[in-house]
Image: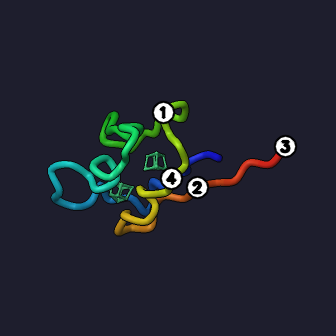
């Protein structure tokens, strides 16, 4: 599966010092690069903690079928 960020919806959690998704990710797979959320796919375990926690509903786990 792949984590998809909707950059139109994401407002970097407003005034939070550390965005909620960065804080919640148990795999340290999320970071901010150039004021954008970025997910390192090989670290991500598709737990969807970030998706549940995001106040802007900007994160989706996309199921990839082969
Ligand atoms: S939790 Fe949602 S709104 Fe906050 S930085 Fe992450 S993707 Fe953006
Ligand atoms: S799905 Fe889980 S492991 Fe992947 S980026 Fe979100 S919180 Fe981190």
Q: Is residue 41 left or right of residue 34?
A: right
Indicate which disc residue 43 carries.
Answer: 1
Measured from the top left, where is residue 49 in percent x and y?
A: 43, 57
Disc nearer the start of the sequence (3/4): 4
Q: List the single residue furthest toward the right.
A: 66
Q: Is residue 19 left or right of residue 62?
A: left
Q: List the single residue furthest toward the top.
A: 42
Q: Distance from label 2 to label 3 (Cα)?
A: 16 Å
Judged from the image, the secondary structure of the residue bearing numbered disc 2 is strand
Circle nearer the viewer, 2 or 1? 1
| Label 4 CB sits under 8 Å from any ligand 2 atom | yes
Disc nearer the start of the sequence (2/3): 2
Judged from the image, the secondary structure of the residue bearing numbered disc 1 is loop
Measured from the top left, where is residue 10 in percent x and y?
A: 38, 58
Residue on which disc 3 sits: 66
Disc nearer the start of the sequence (1/3): 1
Question: Which residue corresponds to the image point at 48% horizontal and 33% vertical from the top-left?
Answer: 43
Give the vertical position of 51 relative to 38 (above or below).
below
Judged from the image, the secondary structure of the residue bearing numbered disc 3 is loop
Disc 1 crowd rating (10 Å Cα; few below 14, some 14-19, many 20+) is few
| Label 1 CB sits under 8 Å from any ligand 2 atom | yes
Residue on which disc 4 sits: 47
Q: Nearer the viewer, residue 54 or 7?
A: 54
Q: Nearer the viewer, residue 23 or 9?
A: 23
Residue on which disc 2 sits: 61
Disc 4 crowd rating (10 Å Cα; few below 14, some 14-19, many 20+) is few
Q: Distance from label 3 to label 4 (Cα)?
A: 20 Å
Disc 3 crowd rating (10 Å Cα; few below 14, some 14-19, many 20+) is few
Disc nearer the start of the sequence (2/4): 4
Q: Distance from label 4 to label 1 (Cα)?
A: 11 Å
């Amino acid at each position: 599966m792949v984590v998809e960020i909707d950059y139109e919806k994401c407002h970097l959690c407003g005034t939070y010092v550390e965005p909620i998704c960065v804080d919640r990710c148990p795999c340290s797979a999320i970071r901010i690069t150039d004021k954008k959320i970025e997910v390192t796919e090989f670290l991500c375990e598709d737990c969807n903690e970030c998706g549940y926690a995001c106040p802007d509903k900007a994160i989706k786990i996309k199921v990839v079928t082969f």
